Every structure is written in C-alpha cells, then in structure tokens.
Amino acid sequence: MTLSNRLYFFIIAAFATISFMGNCSYKFRDVSIDQDLKTVRVQLLINRAPYVNPQLSANLTEGVKRKILNQTRLSQTNSDNAHFDISGSISDYSVSTSAISDKQEVNNRLTVSVHIVANNTLKNEVKEFDISRNFEFDAKTSLQAAEARLLEEIIRTLSDDIFNRLFSNW
C-alpha cells in the first residue's frame, strides 16, 4: 500500500469513527413534555427533615431549576399562573452506620429523601413522588466535613433524579 493510499484509508477510518461515535452518544434530552406547557415554577424545597443542613434547601431548589431550564424548552416564572408548578420538601436527612469492621464503624451513610409535588395546571394533573439517595463517607470524618465534601454530589444526583422522574418517567 502506498503512502497516499494509507493516508486516504486513515482519513476515511477516522471520519467513520468520529461519525459513529457522534451518532451513538447518549443524551438526556429524551424528555416528554406536553406541547401546551410553556412555563415552570420551582418553589423552594422546604427542609422538613429532623436534621437540617442549612445549605441544602436553597441549593437543591436551584439545582432542579437549572436542570429544567437547561434540558427543556420551558421558561421560568415566579407567577402563580405557571403551567407546571413544582413544590416539595426534604423529608429525611439522616446518618447511619453502613459498615463495621472489628467492632468499629468504618463507613457512615447519609440518607437524603425528597418529596416532590408536580402540578400540571393546564390539565389539572398532580404527580407526587419520593426520591431517596444514600451517600457513603468514612466514619472517621465528621458529619460537617462529609456534608461539605458531598454537597455538590448530593445536589447533582438528586436534581438528576427529580428531573428524570418529572420528564422521562424513569
């Protein structure tokens, strides 16, 4: 094979690989939204858990808003006339031991649960559901240090879960 034939073959193979990879990428845009819905209001997710992380409520609310605005065509409103009105509360925020070795705690588990109420005001339909996630951390780490380290992951994970339940029926 000559040098020009090898170069030609390489270019074709590279182009085919890039095209194939581009077509096979997984996207989270497979959302199901009624065409009549134009606006969304995400109300503050109130923290009703026995233990309150003061940063969680506002950060999770903003995470859900960002996810919806970035992944859908809906526009945000603070009006009582929103087509899709989302509210809810943080219902659990608790720590338990998740692993023991030689009669000593090795890992702890932070459990965060959220109750969501989604009201499609145009169809007068209400959807309620609960999301719960566990986050592991070393038992030698204080809760405050674990919270600081895990907060971004908690927000991202719960926002994704809420979004998927709202729009993708996962």
Image (tube, rainbow, N blue to C red):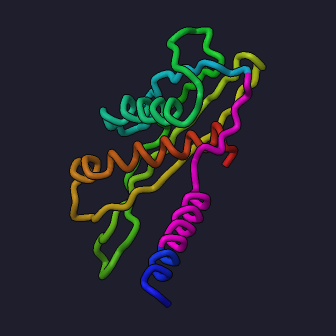
Image coordinates for residue 69, horizontal then vertical, percent: 51, 29
Q: Is residue 91 above or below residue 108?
A: above
How many marks are shown on the rendered structure?
0
Residue drawn at (30%, 82%) of the image:
102
Q: Is residue 74 above or below residue 138?
A: above
Image coordinates for residue 36, horizontal then vertical, percent: 73, 20
* Segment colored magenta: 11-35
Residue drawn at (73%, 28%) of the image:
34
Name the side, left or right, on which 55 lies relative to 124: left
Give the image quarter of residue 52: top left
Name the side, left or right, on which 33 lies relative to 56: right
Most extreme residue toward the top, as rendered?
A: 80
Residue drawn at (47%, 82%) of the image:
6
Residue drawn at (57%, 68%) of the image:
16
* Foreground of the two, 23 or 142: 23
- Is residue 27 on the magenta stretch? yes
